[in-house]
Amino acid sequence: MDAGGISDLDLDKYDADEQVKIICLGDSAVGKSKLMERFLMDGYRPQQLSTYALTLYKYTTTINGQTVLVDFWDTAGQECFRSMHPSYYHKAHACIMVFDVQRKITYKNLPIWYKELREYRPEIPCLVVANKIDADMKVTQKNFSFAKKQGLPFYFVSAADGTNVVKVFKDAIQMALSYKRNSNDFMDEVMRELENFDLDSKEESSAKDEETQEGKPDSA
Ligand SMILES: Nc1nc2c(ncn2[C@@H]2O[C@H](COP(=O)(O)OP(=O)(O)OP(=O)(O)O)[C@@H](O)[C@H]2O)c(=O)[nH]1
Ligand SMILES: [Mg+2]
């Protein structure tokens, strides 16, 4: 199965017009899973596919009258930075990068996560999220300059009390969609070409089918 790709099966199954993939990065215990659970709790109950290192949450939403199927990818147990398998990044349309305001090291590690993200996905939108602000509201006065330096959107959130969680995820979905529609990423263009090519050839072959249908001698 092409886990990161557009799966016609999924689109049919969820009756969706479009599909985007959003990945989540950050050190262990920063709250990646809790954030996802908090967001998904508010509505649709996701189908959850758990494996040792990976959880895939499926979520559908309607944006401008179109049904969008969102695949949220979550990894577990990165005690310290460890390279992710390339398939994790494959065809991702946006990234939510999380650190824990209570543990400085998780902030210090952001550049390492970011560097790897950019190796695989040079252009996708990346949102930086400072989690656990409920533990100490004063941190929101602090200056976390990494996001600003990189020109990335930045949010103070709390998975525990829900502050800004919906906002982050809605923004991420919106950004993923516009990225998917407008990206100039070379590889994405190639993929789009291939997808169109695939559609064209499908149409052609169904046109041929019709021809042969019509061309069949009437048995009556
Ligand atoms: N106070 C507070 N605790 C939180 C918050 N979000 C998560 N936690 C706690 O932080 C711990 C780790 O949360 P997880 O969501 O499991 O962290 P993770 O990033 O998914 O960790 P891995 O799966 O190991 O990579 C848990 O004990 C959570 O209860 C938050 O917003 N506030
Ligand atoms: Mg987790």
Image (spheres, rainbow, N blue to C red):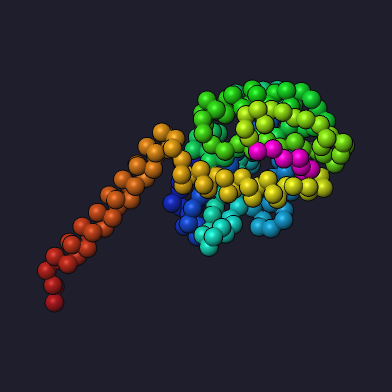
Total number of numbered labels? 0
Specify whether 210 is left or right of 96: left
- Whether residue 75 is visible to the viewer of this picture, yes or no, is no
Is residue 4 covered in magenta? no
Residue at x-position 55% and y-position 34%:
88
Is residue 158 covered in magenta? yes
Q: Closer to the camera, 11 or 50?
A: 11
Residue 206 in percent (x, y) is at 26, 58
- Whether residue 211 is visible to the viewer of this picture, yes or no, is yes
Q: Quadrant of the C terminus?
A: bottom left
Residue at x-position 17% and y-position 67%:
214
Residue 110 in percent (x, y) is at 68, 26
Residue at x-position 54% and y-position 54%:
68
Q: Closer to the camera, 161 or 171?
A: 171
Q: Residue furthest bottom?
A: 220
82 is higher (above) or lower (below) than 205: above
Residue at x-position 28% and y-position 55%:
203
Residue 160 in percent (x, y) is at 81, 45
Residue 117 in percent (x, y) is at 57, 29
Q: Residue furthest left?
A: 217
133 is higher (above) or lower (below) than 122: below
Q: Quadrant of residue 134?
A: top right
Q: Closer to the camera, 182 or 217?
A: 182
Specify whether 182 is left or right of 132: left
Specify whether 130 is left or right of 58: right
Q: Please provide the residue range marked out in magenta.
A: 153-159
